[in-house]
Image (cartoon, grey):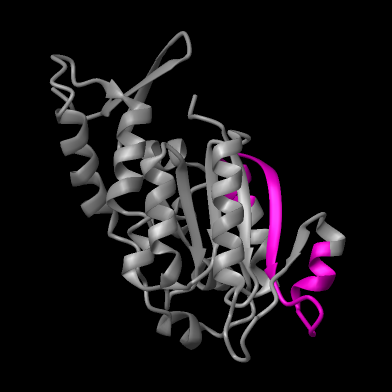
Amino acid sequence: MEKEYSFALLIDTDNVSPKYYDIIVNELEEIGSIKVKRAYGDFIANNPWKEKSIGEGITPIQAFAPIKDKNSTDLVLTIDAMDIFYSELVDAFCIATSDSDFARLAQRLKEGGMYVVIAGEDKTPISLSKSSDKFLMLDKLYEARTPTKSRSEKESVKVEAPSVKTLQNVVRDFIAMSDDAEGWALYATVANQLSKRYPQFNVKAYQAKSKQEFFKSKLGCEFRQEGTVVFVRMKDKK
């Protein structure tokens, strides 16, 4: 019903902890499959991703720094990304990083027709998160899946997700743009528009198991399917 993407997962080990790996994989596998998994950094040093790479079938790519204190990971990852892009092996990328230096790479991949996911922490600059089609806020997703914090600690977590009412109004506007007399719009188009408007949007923040469940239970939508094409509208459409 929704497009199944083939992903290249490229991990900047200088900026992302291996504790987020399972979250990244689970999020990507909800919308596609991962064909390429590579991690970039200095694996001669004590890289925390070394063990994870061995256990999870991730290809470690050594990035030597030609000048002391200068990081070459960005350059190696970018070159590899463009090689994969031109090989046409995938139609989507996930770049796991919080480094704003990758913003232009994300933009270039999108310009080339790729679906781009950025997986970073809350500290990720908006210049990077807004360069993606979807932004995974890893620390918030990790906190939501780790039931070890006290109630006071949970309440102190900053909530970045837009309110359900806000999303309902936005989706209503997107559906209205279809100009259908009975209020129907292409579900894939509406869902994609929502993700582009709010790259940080994640249904798990609203206790929903899938995007369609969120549309039904939280936004008050209904669906109609014709063959492989799915349509959506607001239930209160007169």
The residue lying at 64 percent from left, 68 percent from top is 20
User: Where residue 3 sits: x, y (%)?
Assistant: 50, 29
Question: Any magenta on residue 31?
Answer: yes
Frontmost residue, 196 versus 85:
85
Span highlighted in magenta in the image: 26-53
Q: Is residue 3 magenta?
A: no
Q: Quadrant of the C terminus?
A: top left
Please give left or right for residue 217 compared with residue 43 in the image. left
- Coordinates of residue 166 in the picture (x, y in percent): 21, 53
Compared with 223, 138 (above or below) is below
**Where 172 falls versus 125 (above or below)?**
above
Q: Is residue 144 visible?
A: no
Where does the image place residue 97, in percent across and percent down from the top left?
53, 68
Q: Quadrant of residue 200?
A: bottom left
**Side (left or right) of 188 relative to 99:** left
Residue at image position (61%, 36%) is 87
Q: How many marks?
A: 0
